[in-house]
Image: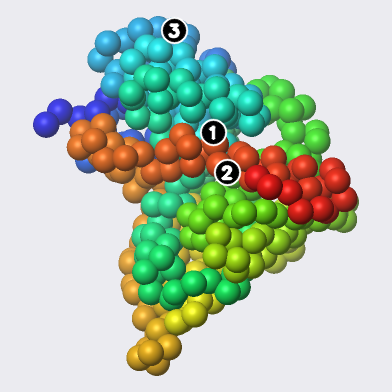
Amino acid sequence: MTDVRIGVLGAGRIAQSAHLPAISKSAGASLSGIFDPSPVLRAGACQRYGVPAYADVDSLLADDTVDAVVIAVPDRFHLDLASAALAAGKHVLVEKPLAGTLAESQELVALAKKSGLVLQVGAMKRHDPGVRFAAVAVRERIGRILSATVWYRVMSALRPEVEATYFPPMIVDEQMRATETTFKVDRGNYLLVTHGAHVLDGMRYLLGDPKELCARRTNIGNDYTWHGLATLAGDGLANFEITANVHSEWSEGAEIFGEKGSVKLCTPFPVTMAASGVEVFDEATGMIERPVFGDTNPYKKQMDYFVRTITEGIPADPNADDGLAAVRLIDAVNRSLDAGGVWVTP
Ligand SMILES: NC(=O)c1ccc[n+]([C@@H]2O[C@H](COP(=O)([O-])OP(=O)(O)OC[C@H]3O[C@@H](n4cnc5c(N)ncnc54)[C@H](O)[C@@H]3O)[C@@H](O)[C@H]2O)c1
């Protein structure tokens, strides 16, 4: 079988640190070429991977040898580029969040469904085997959920050093970076969208869709925290926390308590290439299970899976509806905040 040939739109941080290495390591994928409006990033990334630079988005999408497109550009361009790629007959892996707003996300879901092509969202934590094991254990082994806590705390001063260790050397365009910074001035909103797209997708993946939620936010200077409470389908309660930044190590996980047992999940900073630690307690046997998964690159696993959606027809994970549901939860958090922390229906 021939490789799935992938064109990449965007050669910024996540493309360089995650998608380009993942494509080059994934057995069923090959990189066709890259487009980024920054000449520095476009030339640098193409040289590193020995592939041609496309002159613009249209020429990448017009290339008949390209089967699929990775969209690794700022959120505000997701709808335009993903819909153009689908219209050109390309399968799409679009970075999280699905699109820049709830309305745009709804539009993209409709377009994806109409196209019949694959649209997968880059919430790659679903491809961490520890997270997958935990989700199955919650569904099949611990009964109805009474109580859960899900948290995601972004490290502060430690982060650059960790990234410098694990990332390939970053090609940087200072002018592009300065431009993007101007779109992040509403720091509270930016942090909720960028991190909420992971943690709220993770909460749904583990616990299902909440019936309602409420949330509060506070900040000390540039450090923000969101705490929320959600009612689950079976009437259990889940706390969720997003904090960016903590003056501490990375801290991400979940503790879930059901009628028959519990599931605990400890997720590392994703670029550290380790799978989540998971622990499943079964009260009937009194046994705790702690599977060992070995080193794991969730971005490569995401790419391997995306390739299989195209070659084997397995369903995208997360799919466009999942992407929309995560954006809907971010929107619900904001609606609750705007109304002083009241309960809202997502
Ligand atoms: N899954 C994850 O772990 C993760 C981590 C970080 C960022 N992200 C997501 O990835 C996306 C990109 O984030 P980033 O940190 O790489 O941003 P970035 O600003 O470093 O890179 C984005 C790049 O897109 C380019 N670009 C802009 N318009 C374009 C166009 N029309 N065609 C092609 N390229 C274009 C920019 O020039 C820039 O180089 C965002 O949606 C973000 O939420 C995901």
- Image coordinates of residue 182 in percent, x first then y, are 77, 27
Point 80% across, 36% down: residue: 186
Secondary element at image label 3 = helix
Q: Which label is found at residue 58?
A: 3
On screen, 298 above or below 99?
below
Nearer-N-terminus badge (1/2): 1
Q: Amino acid at mark 1?
A: Leu
Query: Which residue lies under the disc numbered 1?
Result: 98
Q: Which label is found at residue 220?
A: none
* Callout 1–callout 2 Cβ contact below 8 Å: yes
Q: Amino acid at mark 3?
A: Asp
The Cα atoms of the two marked residues, 1 and 2, are separated by 8 Å
Mark 1 beta carbon near ligand 1 (under 8 Å): no
Give the color scheme: rainbow, by chain, secondary structure or one colour.
Answer: rainbow
Residue extending furthest left?
A: 1
- Image coordinates of residue 130 in percent, x first then y, are 40, 64
